[in-house]
Image (tube, rainbow, N blue to C red):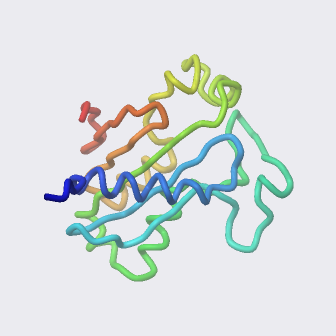
């Protein structure tokens, strides 16, 4: 018998592949927005369509945050809204894979974290607000260090 992955592992695996398209050297984020076990959209962190990326011209960091890159969560949700109503999205689950690329980028952006291995945080405030506004049912996030967190109504619970 074939050993098939669980649905969560399946979508997290796809999110990890999506993160490989990220164009910010500080971190990679890949997101998959899912409704009824069907993919609505994907998104990764990178420059807006048609703009030069961080890989092309470097990061534009303000308050420890690269403002050149649009976050994966935002890209996945806004792309899905082109084809689905906000009402339809309210039952969706967002799967995210997030990996910082160096201890230096972790310390600069997340001073409370020691290293890539210790990185464990909630999505940023603007992305959290967007997810709350769109009533995304839950967020399942796998960090590069292997930790998986499940956020339902933004209460954290270990998976």
Residue at the outermost front position = 1
| In-front residue for pair 45/154 | 45
Figure check: 102 above or below 48? above
Figure check: 19 above or below 113? below
- Give the quarter of the figure containing the C terminus: top left
Residue at the outermost bottom position = 83
Q: How many circles with numbers are drawn on the protein? A: 0
| In-front residue for pair 128/118 | 118
Residue 67 in the image: x percent, y percent? 70, 49
Figure check: 94 above or below 100? below
Residue 86 in the image: x percent, y percent? 33, 72
Side of 107 where 42 appears, left or right: left
Side of 26 where 52 appears, left or right: right
Q: In percent of the image, x 78 and y 54: which residue is there?
A: 55
- Give the quarter of the figure containing the N terminus: bottom left
Residue at the outermost right position = 57
Side of 53 where 153 appears, left or right: left
Residue 154 in the image: x percent, y percent? 30, 40
Residue 53, by quadrant, is bottom right
Q: In percent of the image, x 75 and y 39: which residue is there?
A: 62
| In-front residue for pair 5/109 | 5
Q: In percent of the image, x 27 and y 63: which residue is there?
A: 92
Residue 49 in the image: x percent, y percent? 68, 72
């Amino acid at each position: 018998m074939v050993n098939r992955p669980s649905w969560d592992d399946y979508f997290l695996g796809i999110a990890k592949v999506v993160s490989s398209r990220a164009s910010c050297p500080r971190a990679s984020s890949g997101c998959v927005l899912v409704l009824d076990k069907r993919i609505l959209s994907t998104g990764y962190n990178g420059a807006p369509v048609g703009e030069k990326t961080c890989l092309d011209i470097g990061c534009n960091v303000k308050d420890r945050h690269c403002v050149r890159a649009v976050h994966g969560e935002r890209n996945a949700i806004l792309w899905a809204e082109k084809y689905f109503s906000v009402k339809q999205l309210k039952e969706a689950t967002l799967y995210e894979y997030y990996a910082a690329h160096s201890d230096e980028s972790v310390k600069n952006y997340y001073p409370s974290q020691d290293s890539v291995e210790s990185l464990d945080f909630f999505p940023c405030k603007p992305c959290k607000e967007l997810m709350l506004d769109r009533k995304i049912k839950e967020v399942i996030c796998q960090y590069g260090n292997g930790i998986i967190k499940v956020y339902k109504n933004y209460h954290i619970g270990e998976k």
